[in-house]
Image (cartoon, rainbow, N blue to C red):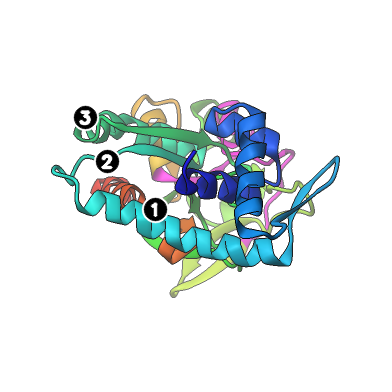
C-alpha cells in the first residue's frame, strides 16, 4: 500500500472516528485500515490517533497531519485529473446527501444523462430530511433547502425555490376554498418542525417585501417532507412547500394550489462542503451540473 492510499485511509478514519466504519465505506478489511494507519505512524514516528474501545480521536499531531492531508489529497486528485487524456471523464465515488423531495423530483430524473457523460463515476446518494453530519458521516457535500444555520462549512448558493400553498380536494369539499387571510380562521394548517418542539409561527406570507405570519389552528405537526405532503393528501390542512416537490401531485389533481397572492418567500437552495481546497474536480463538475438542473425549470 503506497503513501497516498495510507493518507486517504487515515483521512477517512479521522473524519468517521472509526476503523470499522472506514473499512465498511472503503470496502476494505478492518485489518488493512488499521495497518495503514500504523504504517503512517511508524514512518512519521508520531502517534496520530488515540484509540479507545468506543472512539478513535486525533492527537494534536494527528490534527495537524489531517489538515495537511486534506489539502494534499485534494491537490493530488486535481493533478491526476489535469493530465488525463480525456479530462472530461470523471472517476471515483461521490457521496452526496440531499432532501428526499429534491432527489425524487429534480435530481434523480436528470441523473441518467449526467452518468452517461461520466460512466466511470459512481454516486452514493443519501435522501433524508435528517441533518446529516457531513464530516462524521463521510459526505463530499450536502444539499440544503431553506435558511442555513451558522457552521464552519463552505456554502455555495444554487437557486431559489418558489413556494406554494396546497390543499387536497377532500379538504376543499369539507372546509371550502380560502380566498383571503381572514378566511384562514376557519381553516387548518399542517405544521412542520424538524424537532417537533414548540409550535410553528403559522401561515407564512409576504407583504411589502416582508415575511409575516397569520396565526392558524392545526391538529398535526410533522418533521419530514414526506409526512408533510401525506398529511395534506389526507385532508388534514394547508401546507406551504416548494413547488417542485408537489408539481406532479398538482398536475394529477391530487393537490390544489390556493391563496396564490399570499405565498411564502422563496426557499434558498445551497450546497455545503467541508473545505474549499477539498473540492475535487468531480465534485466541482457535479455541483455545476446540479446548479443547472435546479435552475432549469424548478424555481
Q: Looking at the image, which residue sits at the far right?
A: 53
Residue 221 seen anywhere in this rendered image of the structure: yes
Spatial distance from mark 1 to mark 2, Cα to Cα?
A: 29 Å
| Location of mark 2 (residue) | 90
Residue at 48% from the left image edge and 57% from the top image edge: 273
Q: Which mark is residue 235?
A: none
Magenta region, residue range: 214-243
Q: Is residue 272 left or right of residue 25?
A: left
Q: Nearer the viewer, mark 1 or mark 2?
A: 2
3 or 2: tag closer to the N-terminus = 2
Q: Is residue 267 left or right of residue 34?
A: left
Tell me where residue 126 appears, x and y as whole percent. Answer: 52, 35
10 Å crowding of disc 1: few (<14), some (14-19), many (20+)? many
Is 65 one of the magenta-colored residues? no
Q: Which mark is residue 161?
A: 1
| Location of mark 3 (residue) | 116
Q: How many marks?
A: 3
1 or 2: tag closer to the N-terminus = 2
Tell me where residue 131 appears, x and y as whole percent. Answer: 62, 48
Q: Mark 2 and mark 1 in contact (Cβ < 8 Å)?
A: no
Spatial distance from mark 1 to mark 3, Cα to Cα?
A: 27 Å
Nearer-the-camera pick, 111 or 99: 111
Q: Nearer the viewer, mark 3 or mark 2?
A: 2
Nearer-the-camera pick, 143 or 207: 143
Residue at 14% from the left image edge and 42% from the top image edge: 86
Up the image or down, 147 lies above or below 127; here it is below
Tell me where residue 232 appears, x and y as whole percent. Answer: 57, 33
Amino acid at each position: 500500500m503506497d503513501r497516498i492510499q495510507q493518507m486517504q485511509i487515515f483521512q477517512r478514519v479521522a473524519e468517521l472516528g472509526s476503523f470499522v466504519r472506514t473499512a465498511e465505506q472503503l470496502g476494505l478489511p478492518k485489518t488493512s485500515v488499521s495497518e495503514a494507519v500504523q504504517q503512517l505512524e511508524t514512518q512519521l514516528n508520531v502517534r496520530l490517533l488515540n484509540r479507545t474501545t468506543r472512539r478513535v480521536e486525533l492527537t494534536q499531531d494527528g490534527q495537524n497531519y489531517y489538515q495537511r492531508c486534506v489539502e494534499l489529497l485534494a491537490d493530488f486528485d486535481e493533478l491526476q485529473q489535469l493530465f488525463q487524456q480525456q479530462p472530461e471523464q470523471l472517476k471515483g465515488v461521490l457521496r452526496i446527501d440531499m432532501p428526499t423531495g429534491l432527489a425524487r423530483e429534480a435530481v434523480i430524473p436528470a441523473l441518467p444523462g449526467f452518468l452517461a457523460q461520466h460512466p466511470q463515476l459512481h454516486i452514493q446518494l443519501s435522501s433524508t430530511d435528517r441533518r446529516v453530519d457531513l464530516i462524521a458521516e463521510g459526505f463530499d457535500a450536502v444539499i440544503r433547502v431553506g435558511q442555513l444555520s451558522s457552521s464552519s462549512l463552505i456554502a455555495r448558493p444554487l437557486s431559489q425555490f418558489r413556494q406554494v400553498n396546497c390543499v387536497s380536494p377532500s379538504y376543499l369539499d369539507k372546509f371550502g376554498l380560502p380566498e383571503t387571510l381572514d378566511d384562514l380562521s376557519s381553516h387548518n394548517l399542517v405544521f412542520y418542525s424538524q424537532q417537533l418542539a414548540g409550535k410553528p409561527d403559522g401561515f407564512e406570507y409576504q407583504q411589502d417585501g416582508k415575511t409575516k405570519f397569520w396565526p392558524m389552528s392545526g391538529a398535526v405537526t410533522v418533521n419530514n417532507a414526506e409526512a408533510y405532503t401525506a398529511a395534506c393528501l389526507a385532508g388534514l390542512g394547508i401546507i406551504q412547500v416548494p413547488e417542485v416537490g408537489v408539481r406532479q401531485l398538482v398536475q394529477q389533481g391530487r393537490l390544489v394550489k390556493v391563496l396564490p397572492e399570499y405565498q411564502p418567500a422563496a426557499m434558498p437552495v445551497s450546497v455545503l462542503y467541508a473545505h474549499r481546497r477539498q473540492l475535487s474536480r468531480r465534485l466541482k463538475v457535479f455541483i455545476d451540473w446540479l446548479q443547472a438542473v435546479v435552475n432549469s425549470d424548478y424555481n
